Image (spheres, coloured by chain):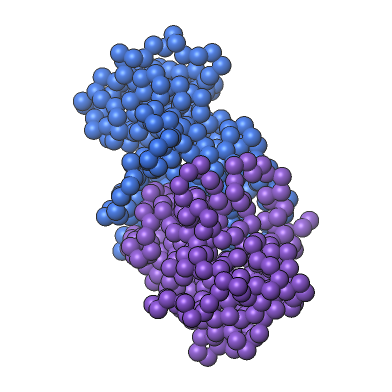
Chain colours: A purple, B blue
Amino acid sequence: MKRLSDIGEDALIERLVAGFPREGLVTGPGDDCAVVDPGRGRLVLLKTDAIVAGVHFEDTAPASRVGWKAAARVISDFAAMGGRPEHLLVTVALPRTTPVRWAEGLYRGIRRCLDRCGGVLAGGETTSVPDGSSAVISVAGTGSVARGKMVLRSGGKPGDLLAVTGRLGGSIGGRHLRFEPRLAEGEWLASHGATAMMDLSDGLAKDLPRLAAACGCGAVVDRGKLPRHRGCSVEQAMGDGEDYELLVALDPRKWRSRDWPEGLAPVSVIGRLAEEGDVFEGGWDHFSP
Amino acid sequence: MKRLSDIGEDALIERLVAGFPREGLVTGPGDDCAVVDPGRGRLVLLKTDAIVAGVHFEDTAPASRVGWKAAARVISDFAAMGGRPEHLLVTVALPRTTPVRWAEGLYRGIRRCLDRCGGVLAGGETTSVPDGSSAVISVAGTGSVARGKMVLRSGGKPGDLLAVTGRLGGSIGGRHLRFEPRLAEGEWLASHGATAMMDLSDGLAKDLPRLAAACGCGAVVDRGKLPRHRGCSVEQAMGDGEDYELLVALDPRKWRSRDWPEGLAPVSVIGRLAEEGDVFEGGWDHFSP
């Protein structure tokens, strides 16, 4: 009998959503967000995400940081489409023995994130899990993106430049709990030559092949150009994951690095899309063997 | 130190969402769904919900039934507003040892429910939970309701009739895994005198006081009139929970039971809203002591 750890996350998702009708979706499962066209005005973005105690955060992590992370992960996906958050729904599944103060701290972190990034808490759900089970915090949200400014994972072509915002690696030291969703950067990139975009959650080594595959090509990375956090090796920058920086393919005829606005996180060109790409190893897979 | 089991679910939710801005929400946390007005056309409904192994379903439950339940619970909340489902987002947090076949069965049940009720799977998320932790399936969704036909929990007045669809009690025997969201019934009630409505998830004894409190009054129930499933006592019909029938307050000047359409689940008048109501005991609270 095959178990989830035998087939890995990407193959699992592919199996699960195969055959579902996609009527009315601009894009469905497989991109950072699903996109719905309401017929006029901005396009609607839909996203859900979850974090689990013992997987995405340690029990010792401050509750407000956990709340920030739960909300910021979803908002980062809106950023990766060139969009912004609108309404969030929060589901918390907690052991009955959880301190009330912890739950309040969690929500305080969610609120801080919404105050910072925009978006309104629209509702939620609380449920118990059996004693000894891990807490799960699931956040779903709606966002929006200007018509004509949306960036999918799939629009890149061989020859496009590859770039990332910020720096990579070592997020486990604490940055995975306090990262800033790259909303302004995503919106700016969407208007200045981005052909494909995603946020880096599982590490460049895992996520870049996904972006390249969605574009139907390969990717070449100049590892010496990877913007690394202090003390991080190239391997860490490639594989640590949970950076939540944007990975973007850029049309070289439209991209001018000198136009990059002050005040935004830096952007670094790290390689290019190509007919034949490098092979990458590493990164995070929830169900890898 | 206070724990969640010391304060109960309703008090917890009240604490968590206190102070959050609600800009742009027609109604926010506290009703069956949050409601957003996009400015024109149908109103947008937002809802999230979760089911947990060992709490909402046993490990021996067929996976497709579990999937049906996960989707149907959210859709039942759209029904309770007089609305219908549009797009669903599914988050599954599963142990790595879960059989692939189980995950596929889960999604088959979700698909059956969408085929039956309408609505499109827009996306999802998969994550692992530590070994030994319970599986959590969280479903978020968008729905819609015709402008002017939305029914909140809070619109009832003393003197309004109280009614329920279908029959109550004994869902633990299996009906909690295969109930039909009362979409047609909810839409019809919304157009024929409903002043307040919700779906019954935690039992009439727990949910009716919530509806009455939202209306700022009490409720009187004629227990002899409760429509019960075969073999169920009045206490079971009051307290078992997970019926997912609609509880509705009806304007007695508009309600005519003889107009109730053939083909819909039966509807039964069980009491009325009143200035001073009965006291109810029982029902389900995830965090009760």
> Which residue occupies the extreme bottom position in the image?
A231
Residue nearest the viewer, comparing A187 with A221: A187
Residue pictured at 61% horizontal, 37% vertical: B114
| Residue A30 in sight | yes
Residue nearest the viewer, comparing A190 with A63: A190
Residue A128 percent location from the top left of the image: 46, 52
> Which residue occupies the extreme front position in the image?
A253
User: Which image quadrant for residue A24?
Assistant: top right
Q: Is residue A147 above or below residue B216?
A: below
Q: Where the N terminus of chain B falls, by quadrant?
A: bottom left
Residue B173 percent location from the top left of the image: 58, 33
User: Which image quadrant for residue A239?
Assistant: bottom right
Residue pictured at 66% horizontal, 77% vertical: A272
Residue A216 percent location from the top left of the image: 73, 64
Residue nearest the viewer, comparing B79 with B69: B79
| Residue B74 in sight | no
- Number of dots carrying numbers: 0
Residue B190 percent location from the top left of the image: 40, 24
Residue pictured at 34% horizontal, 45% vertical: B25
> Which residue occupies the extreme top position in the image?
B258
Residue pictured at 33% horizontal, 36% vertical: B210
Q: Is residue A282 left or right of residue A76?
A: right
Q: Is residue B99 left or right of residue B137?
A: right
